[in-house]
Structures are given as structure tokens and as C-alpha cells.
Amino acid sequence: MIGRFASAGTYKELLSSREFYRIGAAGLLAVGSYAASRAGAPPWIADGLAIVSVVINGIPIIWGAVAGLMERKVNVDELVSLAIIACLIKGEFLTAAVVSFVMVFGSLLEEAASSSARKSIEALIKMTPDTATVLVDGEAREVSVEAVSTGDTLVLKPGERIPVDGRIVRGSTSVDESSMTGESLPVERRVGDVLHAGTLNQTGAIEMQALRVGEDTAVARLVRLVEEAESQKPRAVALIDRYAGWFTPVILVAAALTWLLTGDMDRAITVLIVGCPCALILAAPTAVVATIGRVARAGVLVRSGDLLEEAAHVDTVYFDKTGTLTHGDLRVVAMESTGDVDREELLRIAASVEASSTHPLADAIVRAASEAGLELRTAEDVETIPGQGARGSVDGEVVSVGAPTGEDEAPRVAGERLAGASVVWVTRGAEPLGMLALAGEPRVEARHTVASLRGQGIGTIAMLSGDYEAAAQAVANAAGIETVHPRLKPEEKLALIRGAQAEGHRVMFVGDGINDAPGLAAANVGVAMGGAGTDVVLETADVALMRDEIDKLPFVIGLSRRMLWVIKWNIVFGLAFNALAVVASGGGYLTPIAGALVHNIGSVLVVLLSASQGFVPEPASAAEPEPAIDDSERQAA
């Protein structure tokens, strides 16, 4: 029971009124036993009250020990159980009652402190409304949240909480995202922006398309991640699990030697009590959960504790370009046709093929066609070729939209590249129809992020891009990245990542497109842009930036490093504290009751240090706008 309460992975409402009052009532019985003995009442009254107290608080501990032994799992319950039984055999019923109460109540305090991050995350679920207003054939209908499906259009009025994850398709508003991010100031959201379940629509009436519902929403995923993380410890403390089975035999031997050498059973009982390595058991899971909860409030989802350890050891960071270092909302800035089709027809054909793709370049082409009022044609047999583009059949002819295969582009195209634009070519069969040039501004926070990573000792920072060198270099210059690997296919990005790993480097790769999925899966830490990222990318990545804020990366790395320091300090402290307590108990400096108090003090100190992870502030961003594409240069081109 003690060992199970001490585990941060045990989901149980330990502070529920029933549990709290049961333990409290047993504590009052122990107080009554003490008062009766001091008042000169008959011994059977004092002893009877103490025995009832032991039955309430002590029997569950003993039963937990028995259950563990039946499952062939040794845990710390055995030590406390032996101490309680020894007290009862000696006739020290009040001591047994007090020890039972202190140990169980101490576990409640430990659980209350260690579960704060989890409970704050669970509170998000309660903020999600039970109903939603869905447009059905143009009519607004109120339905249960469970009835909402991906693709449904929802209507949200000011003051309503957002029921599912979705993208705004009409209107604009201010959204209070403090439940997810801890940021008190509302943020402006407009058409195209993603909203998360549990946040509050404040000022505007909007319509949004449901993207993720039920268990797939960011909040639900976050709770699942925390549940999984609680059962996982970083590899830095794997030795604890490996040698945990030795603690109980060692303490048993220490208690037996104390009894043999001193002849004082009370000293042996105290050794059993203080020898429980609860502080050591709590060292890793409490720090992991507190860290995951903290980064979650910053809008970052991490799958498990061992990934946090990987993040702490990262020494190489690779960035994708489009949608990662630049904003995902690219725009078509130039078009050139070969003469066989006009520009309008060129855009229509390209958008027809790209309509089913989720790549940022495809989104920009389809959006440009929509803004031009073009009616798209039906494309059949459409396939996306990672790193190369898309291909489909339009009006019975195969159309390809993607990277050019040769170097014979017109000078104007080269000019667009030099201005930092990405170029895609449209061909029909073997006939070139023309090109589209697309560009997006770099993220304002990119340069500050790169500088912060360098300040953390990250030795290698580079861009891996499928774009041409000039376009990639323009964005890299804006971000302060010196090393650029252009014109890479997904398998070539993968080869670079694995090559760095083969040299002993810990690699973090940050991307957002389907073509980034192999790299995200292979990297030691794969980071997906969660706001615009596809489901495939989010499922592949280890970390998701839910609001596409890459300046959170240095915070995650710094907090992960602090987490490892906290865990190691907890381990050292737990071992030293237990050793000193055992020596003091064997020397007769602690009574069984005092030993129980000292034991819980050590455990609570470990939990409080771990909980401090949840209060680490984010560093202030010093990012300054840095234009990636020179407008005058673009005009000249």
C-alpha cells in the first residue's frame, strides 16, 4: 500500500473525502487511545482504540505486502508491515497505530504534491463542454460532443468553450488559451487558425471545421501522454528498478543485526520503518510528470519521460524549411506559363492535382486558385511523392506538380529563387506547362531560437530542405543558420540524420510535412509542428509544438536538463537520507514514531523538489522581426 501510494503512476483519488476521513478517523482513534491511557482508563479501552486504528490504517498496508509477495513482487510495504506486526507482538498497540497513521497520511501528502501536474491536466477535460452547435444543412443544431465528427462545421458564440480541435473557416475572435498555455492574455484568431478543445471563445461569433474529436483532441492526447509517462522512468534511473529488489533484504538484515547487537526490538522496528526507500522510488516519476505537465502548459506535448532525457542530451538540431522556419501560409508570388496555356489555366490545373495534398505548398496553390475564383477540375489517381510533389490525371492526361528535374529554367525563374521563393513546375505528360513561385515569411522567433540553442551548447544547427539552394539559403540567413543542405529527398534527410547518429550525436529534427515523417521517426527527438502538422506527422513525432512556436525548443531542452539534475539529486539525497536514518535508528536516536515522521519528511522533500519543475518560468523571447525575402529584390526579379 505504501509502495503503491508512492508510485506516481497509481491513479487514485487519495484526497477524496472517503479516503481522507477514513484515515483521519483512525488517527483520532489513536489520539483517543493516548488520551485514555493518560487519563487512567482501563487498559482494554486504550488498547482497543489503538487496535481498531491499526485495523483501519495498518491492515491495508499488511495486505498490500501480502499481495505483492503473492505476485512475487517485493516492495517497501513488507518493511512497514513487519514493523507494525512487531509492535503488536510486543503489545505496543499505540505505537503500531501511530506508525500506521503517519505512514499512510504521509503517503497522502506525497500523492497530493506529486499529482498536482496531473490534476491540472485532468481539469482541462472538465473544461470541455458536453454539447456543441453543429451546422446541418445550413441549420444550427445542438448535439452532444460525442456526436461531432471530423469535418463537421461548428458554430461558436462569444463566451462559449471550444468543444473539439478545429480550424476557423469564418469570422475572427479573441481566444483565452490560459487553460492550455497558462498565458493570461487572450490571442487573436482568424480564418485558418487552429483552436483547441477546452479553450474559451471570448469576443467573436465564428464557424470552425472539426479537425480532431474525442480521444484525438490535444487535451485528450495530453492526458494519455501523462498517463504513459507516469509509468516510464528515464534511463538515467533504470538502475533503481534493477536493484530495487535488494532494498528490502538489505534493510531486513540491518534490522536483524540491530536487534542482535543491541537486544532492543524498538531500534530494529525503527530501522524497518526508516529503511523504506520511498524517497528513492519517488525520485524519477514525480520529476518526469511535473516536467511533462510544465511543458504541456507551454503548448508542447511530449510522449514519454525517456524522450525528455533524450532532449537533455541533444547536441545536433536539424530544421526543415517550409512550415517550420517559415510560416505555413505560403503564397503564390509569381507564375509563368509556356504559352500553350495561360496563367489562369496553369493555376487551375496545378490546384486540381494538389487539392487532396496537405503539404504547405499545395495549400498555397489551392488557396490561390480559390482566391482567383477558379473552378477546379476532378483529378483522378492522385498520388503524393514525398520530396518530389504530386501527380494525377486531369482530363485523361497525367499532370505532375513539383520540383523540376533539370537546370534549364528561364532567367526569371532563377530570379524568383534568388528572392527566396520556392519553385514548382507543372508538366502534362512530357510537356512543360509552366512554373509557380511560392514564398513565405520566416518565423519572427527563428533567429532568437537558433541563438538560444547555440547558447545551450548545441554544436550543430543546420537546415535540411528539399528546396533549391538560393531559396533555402535566404531563409537560413534570416534564421542565423550557417549550414544548409538543399535539394534533399526524404531518404537523403534520413541518411543525414542517421549519419550524425552513427558519429555519436544526439539529433533533434524539427519538421511539419509528410515528407518529414521518416526523419521525425529516426531522430533521437522528432519535433512536429502540431498546429499545422498532419496526423501522420503528429503520430510519428516524439514532441508536438501545438502552436508552432519553435522558440519553445530551448525551453524544453533546458527544462529536460534540469529534470535530470533533479532526478540525480533526488537519488543522492534519498540514498544518503535513508542511510543516515538507518544509522540513527540503530543507534537509538529515533523511536518508531519519530522514524515514521522522519521517513515521510524525506519523501515529501523529494516530491517538493520534483514539483518545482512545474514552476520554472519560460525565458523572455528576444526575437526581432527578420524579413526573409527582400521585397525590392522580388520586384526586381
Image (cartoon, helix red, strand yellow):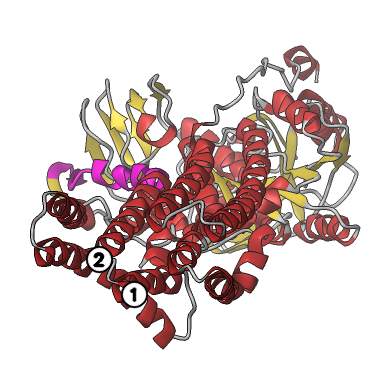
Q: Which residues are magenta?
A: 115-141
Q: CA distance from mark 2 to mark 1?
A: 10 Å
Residue beneath disc 2: 93
Give the x, y percent position of residue 447: 74, 24
The local secondary structure at tag 1 comes to helix
Residue beneath disc 1: 85
Within the magenta stretch, is there residue 127?
yes
Image quadrant for the C terminus?
top right
Quick one: which residue is furthest to the top in this view? Answer: 632
Can residue 299 be seen here? The reply is no
In the rendered structure, the answer to whether residue 191 lies left or right of residue 333 reads: left
Residue 294's disc is none
In front here: 416 or 205? 205
Q: Is residue 571 above or below residue 63?
A: above
Amino acid type, callout 2: Phe
Give the x, y percent position of residue 434: 73, 41
Within the magenta stretch, is there residue 95?
no
Amino acid type, callout 1: Ile
In the rendered structure, the answer to whether residue 301 lies left or right of residue 528 reads: left
Give the x, y percent position of residue 468: 83, 40
Q: Is residue 319 above or below residue 479?
A: below
Image quadrant for the N terminus?
bottom left
The residue located at (69%, 58%) in the rendering is 236
